[in-house]
Amino acid sequence: MFIEVDGVEKVFEVRRRTGFLKRERRQVRAVDSISFTVARGEMVGYIGPNGAGKSTTIKMLTGILTPSGGRLRVAGIDPSRERRRLAHRIGVVFGQRTTLWWDLPLIDSYRLMHRMYRIPDGRYRENLDRCVELLELGGLLDVPVRQLSLGQRMRGDIAAALLHDPEVLYLDEPTIGLDVISKAKVREFLRELNHDRGTTVLLTTHDLQDIEQLCSRVMVIDHGRMVYDGPLAGLHEAGGSERILVVDLERELPPIEVGGAARVVRTEGPRQWLAFPAGEPAAGLVSQIAADYPLVDLSVREPDIEAVIARMYADKASA
Amino acid sequence: MRRVVVRRAEPARLGEGLRAYRLIAGMWIRSTTAYRTSFALTVVGNLLITVLDFVGILLMFSQVDTLGGWTLPEVALLYGLVATAFGLADLLLGSMDALGARIRDGSFDTLLVRPVPVLAQVGADRFALRRLGRITQGTLVLCWALLTVEVSWTAAKVLLVPVAVVSGAVIFGAVFVGGAAFQIVAQDAAEVQNAFTYGGSTLLQYPPTVFGTELVRGVTYMLPLAFVNWVPAAYVLGRPYPLGLPEWAAFAPPLVAAGFAVAAGLVWRAGLRAYRSTGS
């Protein structure tokens, strides 16, 4: 396995002032015994609410932070012990912090990477040309970074992280704040990168479309614990998510009453919205309504993944 | 086993660090010179401020003939030594006091995923050529002092001047590094660091005889700033040493500097280790 995480935890000690010269020490488990593996060439989405432990996990995988316990390997390397050796093999993009040089033309940042990572000239040329073409950076290389738009800068940052041929790319919120077109470009590029070069990609995001469009696998973390790890489709079941049946009747009627788990969640004139478990087929419900009510039209809405995760958190919290 | 490997890699690591420093400092020079007028203005401004600094001492001597028993050229020698040494350290590592800010805004993490030593990256951070102003002014004052001061020059005295400047720069550099390591633990401690660096260099502009024994003792044994200029200057001028230090103490600066640099390196490592286990 390319990335191996086995029972890894990270405990922070938080000191809080409770009075004059009085401090209270409290231990916070940012990551609480997480285990997973990622195979070479996988593309995995890593999601969870703020403060769930996503960034802490990424920081341990990149060697920025030392785990408090457990075992961690990336490409056979223990990240915190051999941080600089690992650096040659990984690429990191922090969505909200650019690593590009603000006042200098974009190309200057790439030249620095070239020399800092000691990338052979041929490889550098080749990788740069490829990134410039696919990320549409051609006209931007001589523009100072401060004049780039957010989307252009993000594309520039992604290119900077890939010039040294990393085997794995970590992206922390790569599409945050981008417009629809920029998001599409970034996603398209990541898909090709993963497909053509077999680069392993691990991305954290708040935009669930990133996951839907890119990742076959998703890991959900909450309160430092892994609450789901599997295909995107399975997340709906795990989250107990519901599909919505939108029904148009001939006239305004009181809420439809049918047996089972289906229930009306909203009415608006002759239109009613019924929620039913995502795992169940709609056919039975539809025929029952058609038999008992003056049905005109209907449609089924797939569950919104954001709601699914929200429900998952809600369940966890109430449990 | 691992420890042996790390030790053997030490010289290579130093070379790697210096190379990274050069690369990053070069980027900062190009960044600041990108705005030419602004760069020119800060250079001039910086030179003016440092010149005014010495004018303060000149004004003092327009009222008195000696300061703590030291004449103007003698005080100028003290001033020139410390200003040049501090200027060198300030040019090379002066931006390290911004480390706390980098930790607070999270950009410190981006340095930790690079394949080059973090100390080199932090040291070269915001490298600014405008700081040449202080070195220029310090060197001018030092040259004037050396030409006017009444000393019967010997080979040892001549040699001691550049040795003291370089050792002094290393001592101040070690204070910058140690202070930066302290900021990892206490991120808003930039002013504490400045008290030792800028404060220390201002203190050393005056003869030790104007200060109380306790302060001189602290600046000699606790934080060995006395070796930057007080002790070497006392030797050159044939004056009594502060605290009755032995004769050879004047030649101790390189040793003090080396010891202090090693200590600062260890403190830095400890700070970095603390960051990586706490995330601050």
Image: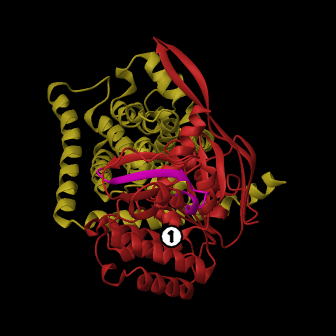
Chain colours: A red, B yellow
Q: Relative to B44, is A294 on the left or the right?
A: right
Q: Quadrant location of the N terminus of chain A?
A: bottom right
Q: How many discs mark residues in the rendered view? A: 1
Question: Could you tell me residue A298's position as x and y percent?
Answer: 41, 63
Query: Label 1 is found on which chain of the structure?
Result: A
Asked whether residue A270 is drawn in magenta, I would say yes
Q: Nearer the viewer, residue A240 or A150?
A: A240
Q: Is residue A297 above or below residue B278?
A: below
Q: Quadrant location of the C terminus of chain A?
A: top right
Q: Is residue B21 above or below residue A30?
A: below
Q: Is residue A32 above or below residue A237?
A: above
Query: Residue sitting at 67 percent across and 52 percent down?
Result: A80
Q: Is residue B22 visible?
A: yes
Label 1: state its secondary structure.
helix
Would you name the residue on which mark 1 appears?
A213
Magenta range: A269-285
Question: Could you tell me residue B247's position as x and y percent?
Answer: 56, 32
Crowding at label 1, few (<14), some or many (≥20) Cα neighbours within 10 Å?
Answer: few
Give the quadrant of residue A314.
top right
